Image (cartoon, rainbow, N blue to C red):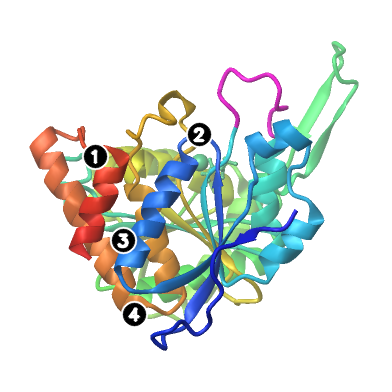
Amino acid sequence: MSGSRLSKDEPSRDGRPSYRVGLIPGDGIGPEVIAEAVKVVAATGIKLDTVSYDLGAGRYLRTGDVLPSSVLDELRQLEAILLGAVGPPVDSTEVPAGLLERGLLLKLRFELDLYINLRPFSPVPGSIADGADLVVVRENTEGSYAGEGGVLRKGTKQEVATQGSVNTRFGVERCVRFAFDLARSRQRKSLTLVHKANVLTFAGDLWRRVFDDLGEGYPDVSRSYDHVDASCIYLVESPLRYDVIVTDNLFGDIITDLAGAVSGGIGLAASANLNPARTGPSLFEPVHGAAWDIAGSNSANPLAAIRSAAMMLDHLGEHDAAARVTRAVVEYAAASSSSHEGRSSASTAEIGDAVAGKV
Ligand code: IPM
Ligand code: MN
């Protein structure tokens, strides 16, 4: 099924270019938070030529489609993709476990070669990580997510299940190089590799050697190494030690939930799934899920989706608009955390309006 095109003036009437952006609002609170993200982008004056794609649990339950190849082909032609959330209600038994994750979200990450999952954290005042400013660079196409493994004698007492972690020198190198470049561009110029090299001696050793080898070319970037379990303590007890963290897919998944929690909540955590080689579109999404329990109540926090849209603007080269949106989100979050002790009473649309008013 093809997307519905809302407008396609390029360049737009006032002469500015418009960007061809695919929207995948998805399930649960996804459509509500994406509407606010689009509203805030419009307030910057940047024109988007949006195409909406109906994908997620809703589409699957109606039609049995997860990601038809014709849709994937259309998505490849876009300049960026903004995704809300995909996933069935927690108690749903109609969508097999992992079907949407593997068949839609991970498939997009792999097929579009979105090999960096970039997750910045700007802790709000009063949060555990208050004062920190850290970014996690998560490898996004390999590791335990690659799908290696299988099951034998399923359902018997002799059942065997394996799930390996795929780490290629090519994949590790391009991720670590991205992280060094990012660290070099920041004020502190500090990069920490997070792994479990004391136990995962094959994969960990590859990561450490690549980290040290590439590090030679970045004498201006200070580098350190933390085991992933210890990094969970540090994120809570001394988060200021971190500037840029680089890590594998699964460790990155886990520590970014923790980093979100200590920074003021997952409602603020944004992410960019990047194809830095720009052989296709990159995809931007809040870290949170579909939150079906509050869907439709106009109470979801859209800040993570709005900040993800800011990361999209940055990737599209609209650095000034991106910075204005990010600043507005961080300011709004800071103000509401100090006035409501972390719980905002504003509705989804009110938060979107307030942020739009600040850009
Ligand atoms: C995330 C999510 C996904 C992941 C799931 C939904 C497949 O938790 O983006 O962090 O594990 O990467
Ligand atoms: Mn996750």
Residue 239 screen position, x and y as percent: 26, 48
In the rendered view, would you say 259 is above or below 78? above
> Decide: marks 3, 1 in contact (CB < 8 A)?
no
Residue 3 screen position, x and y as percent: 66, 58
Residue segment shown in magenta? 88-98
Other residues around mark 4 within 10 Å, as few (<14) / some (14–19) / many (≥20): some
> Is the residue indicated by label 1 positioned so its CB lies within 8 Å of ligand 2?
no
Q: Is residue 220 visible?
A: yes
Relative depth, front residue between 333 and 142: 333
* Mark 2: amino acid: Gly
First-in-chain label (2 vs 3): 2
Q: CA distance from mark 1 to mark 4?
A: 27 Å
Q: Secondary structure at mark 1?
A: helix
**Disc marking residue 220:** 4
State the residue lying farthest toward the bottom: 15
Q: Residue at (30%, 70%) from the top-left corner?
A: 44
